[in-house]
Amino acid sequence: MLKQGYSIEAQLQSRLTKLLFLLAILLLVPLHLTVRSFVDGIVEQRLGHDAETIITAVSLDPNNQWQLQQERISSIYQRVESGHYFKLQSDQFQALSRSLWDREFNVSSLAPGIVDIAVVINDDQRWMILTQGFKKSDVTFTIAVAEDVTELYHNQWLLELVLLLIMFVVFGFVVWLQRRMVKSGFASLEPVRQAIEKGDIRASIQFPDQLPKEIAPLAFALNRLLARSAAQIERSRTGLGNLAHELKRPIQKLRWLAADLDSNENSDKVIALSEEFQQLMDRELRRARISGTPTPGKLFTPDADLTPMVELFKRIYPAKALRLKQLPQSELPYDRDDMLELIGNLLDNALRYAKTEAEVSITFSSENHSWSLSIEDDGKGVSPENMSRLAERGVRLDEDSPLTGSGLGIAISKAVVESYSGSMSFSDASIGGLCVKVELPI
């Protein structure tokens, strides 16, 4: 029995999602580093320009004291908490920007010509600090210029988050589009699946004109197989009926020859043999009439499919009534030909031994999750000790009865039931005869 395997759609979606996730990492990481380098480069360039301005503003006053000419420095360094700070120091002089207010700004002295760039956290701010050593009039100074880059970095993260969301939206659309394409590709086969489930394989199933290249060979091979199977089943069913029909004349000739035999004993044996042939032939012809036109693979619809059978049995057994108590109008998940053979055999037996009537009912058992078929007659019934022998092949419990039969009907019906992993049981009928109950799981 085939087990449900992996989903092509789920596999494609999983692999595509992993690929897109990897692609997002490969795009966002270099993007983050590039944007950060670009932002740092701009801030570093601005800090370098401000440091040069401050260096040129350092001079000696008339008293030969070092001073910082504030008018030459940008006013942004004069506003408290402006986000732009500097500190100038030497052994003899120190100057701080007013923007520092009460913030600490620790600066390490550097030798002239040395420049250092660092990003540090100062309280709740992230500073980029450019520290540079220089010399004027043989005096070594260290200038440190800082800029608060917290908002710049925050805006960068927001930009990258927006880009990430856009990528997720795009990737989600790609995954949805891929899923839709896969479903639309297989949706063209939905009518084929429905036709196979319904068993409508009397002719080649019409596949769509456009099929995906990956499944087209399988579809065409399946179509050929179904067509061959339908033709073979129909030929075998029709051939069996034809054979039984063609045996009529040879059996009739056999009877004529038996009548001309000198020995009464041999004549009786030949006649008995011809009668056995006649019974087998009549049984196969009756089966062919009950089953009707072969429809291999078609599902069983009790209400529609049993109506012609009832009419046929009324003609075969005109003196006996056949009642249909409960019949579903929907399709059942069983082959039509199998069900007609099963019910036809059981009904034929029931009507043959019934006194006046037989009953048929088909109900669903939610407890066992199965369909239950019940056929009863008002005949003599079967003794409890013989119930277990009913399904034995070729066994007749009415050997002394004038009714004809081969003893194969119930055995054949049991074989059909077992092919569906079902069960068949026998009990006394509520109307007086035998009740045959069949359970067929879904």
Image (cartoon, grey):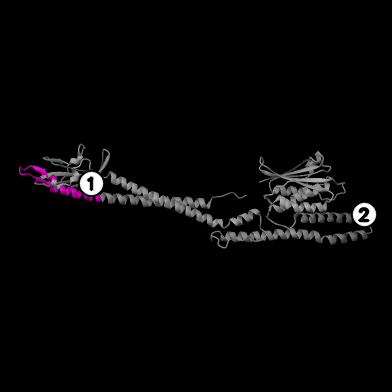
Which label number is shown at residue 321? none
Q: Amino acid at mark 2?
A: Glu
> CB atoms at circles 1 and 2 under 8 Å apart?
no
Percent across and percent down for residue 114 are 18, 47
Few, some or many C-alpha atoms within 10 Å of disc 2 (few <14, some 14-19, many ≥20)? Answer: few
Q: CA distance from mark 1 to mark 2?
A: 127 Å
Query: As drawn, is 299 to the left or to the right of 211?
Result: right
Which label number is shown at residue 265? 2
Q: Amino acid at mark 1?
A: Ile
Query: As drawn, is 208 to the left or to the right of 441?
Result: left
Question: The magenta stretch spans which residues?
Answer: 42-70
Instruction: Report the residue marked by disc 1.
Output: 117
Residue at screen point 28% across, 51% down? 38
Q: Earlier in the sequence, mark 1 or mark 2?
A: 1
| Pick the front one: 280 or 234 | 234
Percent across and percent down for residue 343 are 75, 49
Q: Secondary structure at mark 1?
A: strand
